[in-house]
Amino acid sequence: MFEEEIKQAIKKAIPSVVSIVANKTLVQKGDGSQFWGFLEDENTPLEFSASLKKEKIKVSGGTGFIIDSEGLILTNRHVISDPKAEYTVVLNDGRKFPIKILAQDLINDIAILKIEAKNLPAVELGNSSNLELGQTAIAIGNALGQFQNTISVGVVSGLSRFITASSTISGESSKLRGLIQTDAAINPGNSGGPLIDIDGKVIGINAACVFGAENIGFALPINNAKKCLEDIKKYGRIRQSFLGIRYLLVNSELQKKNNMQVDYGAMVVSEDLPGDLAVFPASPAQKAGIKEFDIILECQKEKITEENPLDAILQKFQVGKDIELKILREGKEKILKAKLEEKK
């Protein structure tokens, strides 16, 4: 019976899963004997030699999934992170469409795409806030960029994980927090695909795997994407809450080195560059009275640490939210209040 439930969940979700292909233009000699590199701009004329030719080639592949019958697609931001690539969505039935990138959330590694198509099969979004260890987790994706609709089945093996991930496409690194850990195999190319539950509802977006380890994969909680989708539908963009400071996370090493009172918090400090400021002018932070070298210990009673940094806490709140900050200034704790504004 359990096997039949898994089959039904996969059957329910798989029509909504798409491949995302990145193409770039290769420049080479007409006889193919010499490689000249990728064309940086498609409109650049080939003036080097009459014998040179252009050819589009696939440079990477990822996965996404349809969340709206009118063509909205969710994926990882790093899947579409190369600004010089041309991206195409390949539907489960083989149809191909160019994409429009509606929004990118750099903090959560989420991208929202749009294709011009109608009556598409959309997957149902679940709730990632009530997940339990041991519950069934099914990953669907375009494994290794080649094997469409690859299925792997496992369980939720960890919650609220924190990792530093590197993109195999762009090479950039990012810190991802609050992740779902699963032993369902997640391979390169699976990125952006859905992690579904036994009911076929999406509980996460496949994000990363650990090379050199077996059965350790991570997915972004789907509830992170829900807020982005609400913003897109209501405002046409992702709205991110803005406090207006630069800060350095305090840890035990920094505490010992500088003989500080605490080993946690966000120390308000500039990057020591010409014209750089620790507190932005006319920002919510300045209006609240935050000063350089203050250490923000808590935001809305949440302790600020390396695993739970200030940015991660702030993204939980809507623009316009009044927040309470506990700070340490010259050895004394005090409470300040700020109203969050939209990040421009």
Image: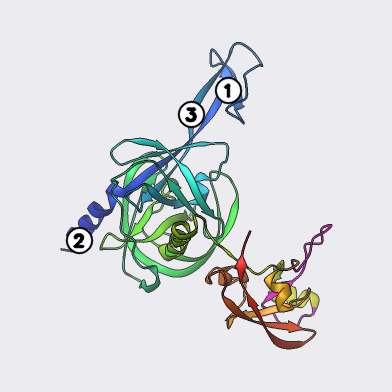
- Mark 3 to mark 2 CA distance (whole Å): 40 Å
Instruction: For the N terminus, give its image quadrant.
Output: bottom left
- Mark 1 to mark 2 CA distance (whole Å): 50 Å
- Give above or below for 155 relative to 114: below
Q: Was residue 38 drawn as part of the magenta stretch in this picture?
A: no
* Magenta stretch, overall SS: loop
* Secondary-structure class at tag 1: strand
Q: Was residue 276 drawn as part of the magenta stretch in this picture?
A: yes
Q: Amino acid at mark 1?
A: Val
Q: Amino acid at mark 2?
A: Glu
For label 2, the residue is 5
For label 3, the residue is 57
Q: Amino acid at mark 3?
A: Ile
For label 1, the residue is 27
Earlier along the polypeptide chain: callout 3 or callout 1? 1
Residue extending farthest left: 1
Horizontal arrangement in the rendering, residue 5 relative to residue 196 (left or right): left
Earlier along the polypeptide chain: callout 3 or callout 2? 2
79 or 96, nearer to the observer: 96
Q: Residue at x 44, y 62 (%)?
A: 230
- Mark 3 to mark 1 CA distance (whole Å): 10 Å
